[in-house]
Image: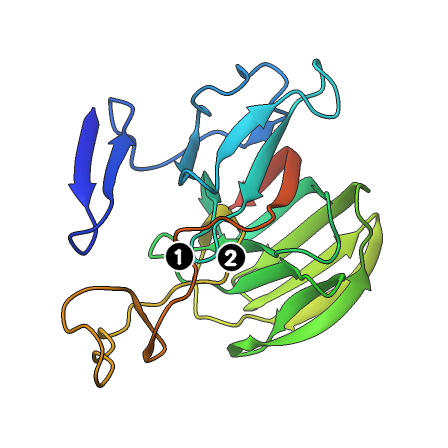
Amino acid sequence: MWLTYSVNKEDIWVSRIPVPVRSAVTEPVNDSFDNMELGAVVPGWNIYSPLWAPVEVVGFPSSKNRSLRLQDGDPYDYARAIRVFPEGRRVSISFRVMAESADRGRLDAEILDGAGHCPVRITWAETGLVQANSGKVLTVVRPLATFEANRWIEVQIQVDAAKKAYSVSLDGKLVIADAAFADEADSVERISFRTGEYRPIHKAQAPIAGGPSDEGVYYAGAIAPQTDHPIAPAVFHIDDVRTTSQYP
């Protein structure tokens, strides 16, 4: 099913929705991307892929060992890929991630419930640090480790919604244990990878005094600069996404 729509009377978007539409996933995720077609639709994933922030399966690190690439050269938008897994209160999620640069862009790996609440967020920041949310405030982060460009990191996240806590291991080393959820969730059922900060829904900014009243982009009270020019892209690769879920 194909849908076309506009956002705030601006860009025209096209969505491709496989049918029949599924409301839940019942089988554990085991995605290596090796058998997926290069540059084609990514089966089982919900993809947000703007022109300057494409998401696609690529032949990296080799033509046979493929990965999911999120590339972001958009100064205000981001690339995003979401994988739904069987709902569970106790869930183990593992994946590999590689950044092509340690000082450009960011990647958020989030564990979400069915309503989009975000109890767990792990960030690869442009400071070269891997960070995790801390407690009830998603904007408060704890540094976990440093990361290098062009080096794969093995990530394992253990989520226990019954305890409202999670643990993270990087390359087999436990770096945070029983950290408190940052958002309320009784279970979790999807993992999200996003190359930019989360965009909450805000009221429209007021026009600038002396500026155009009904045109331009308003950002934090000012017209956003350079919206029509791409920036040097940040590139992240995701591979070997696997989950196990237990409910209750």
Left or right, 225 with reference to 244: left
- Residue 133 position (above or below residue 59): below
Q: Amino acid at mark 2?
A: Gly
Q: Quadrant of the N terminus?
A: top left
Q: Residue at x 24, y 22 (%)?
A: 20
Name the disc covering residue 196, or none.
Answer: 2
Q: Badge 1, how many Cα within 10 Å: few under 14, some, many 20+?
A: some
Pointer 2 or 1: first along the chain:
2
Q: Residue 213 appears at what percent x and percent y? A: 15, 73
Left or right, 188 with reference to 101: left
Q: Nearer the viewer, residue 135 or 213?
A: 213
Q: Residue at x 77, y 44 (%)?
A: 154
Name the disc covering residue 227, or none.
Answer: 1
**Could you say which quadrant of the image residue 32 lies in?**
top right
Left or right, 112 with reference to 58: left
Q: Residue 59 appears at what percent x and percent y? A: 66, 20
Q: Residue 67 appears at what percent x and percent y? A: 64, 28
Q: Residue 3 appears at what percent x and percent y? A: 19, 32
